[in-house]
Image: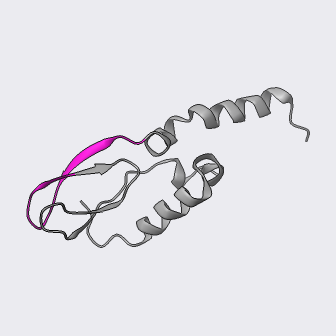
Amino acid sequence: MQLGINYIDRRLSMKESCPGSREITSPSPEIIKCPFCTSNNEIWTDETEIKCTSCKKLINRAMKTTCLDWCPSAKECIGVEKFERIMNSRAFDPLNI
């Protein structure tokens, strides 16, 4: 089966504006409480762990389901390095916040 140019154009434009990858390709800050000392900490939407600014303990949080979980183009879309960093940190998630 030969793919038409319209199909290829739609795939490329979807990668540029994929709603599933927006939080990863254009991250924004969120505030989470440290489960150890209850201080507020800033974490970006593309991060799964941070060090608490107060008690210095590592805070891990579960990322919500994203296109990384199901899209065959996810690695290509967000980049290999970021994809592997996120997927590796999701594999080890001892404390879900």
User: Could you tell me which quadrant the C terminus lies in?
Assistant: bottom left
Q: Position of residue 76 (x, y in %)?
A: 65, 51
Looking at the rendering, the stretch of residues picked out in magenta corresponds to 27-41
Q: Is residue 13 above or below residue 27?
A: above
Q: Position of residue 43 (x, y in %)?
A: 29, 51
Q: Which residue does the image show at 27% across and 64% down from the upper left?
A: 96
User: Could you tell me which quadrant the N terminus lies in?
Assistant: top right
Q: Which residue does the image show at 91% across and 38% down from the upper left?
A: 2
| Residue nearest the observer in this picture, 13 or 53 | 53
Q: Is residue 66 above or below residue 35?
A: above
Q: Is residue 66 magenta?
A: no
Q: Is residue 75 above or below residue 36?
A: above
Q: Quadrant of residue 53?
A: bottom left
| Residue nearest the observer in this picture, 8 or 24 | 24
Q: Seen from this angle, which residue lies furthest right? A: 2
Side of 92 where 74 appears, left or right: right
Q: Is residue 33 magenta?
A: yes
Q: How is the image coloured?
A: one colour
Q: Which residue does the image show at 57% across and 31% down from the upper left?
A: 17
* Badge count: 0
Q: Quadrant of residue 75?
A: bottom right
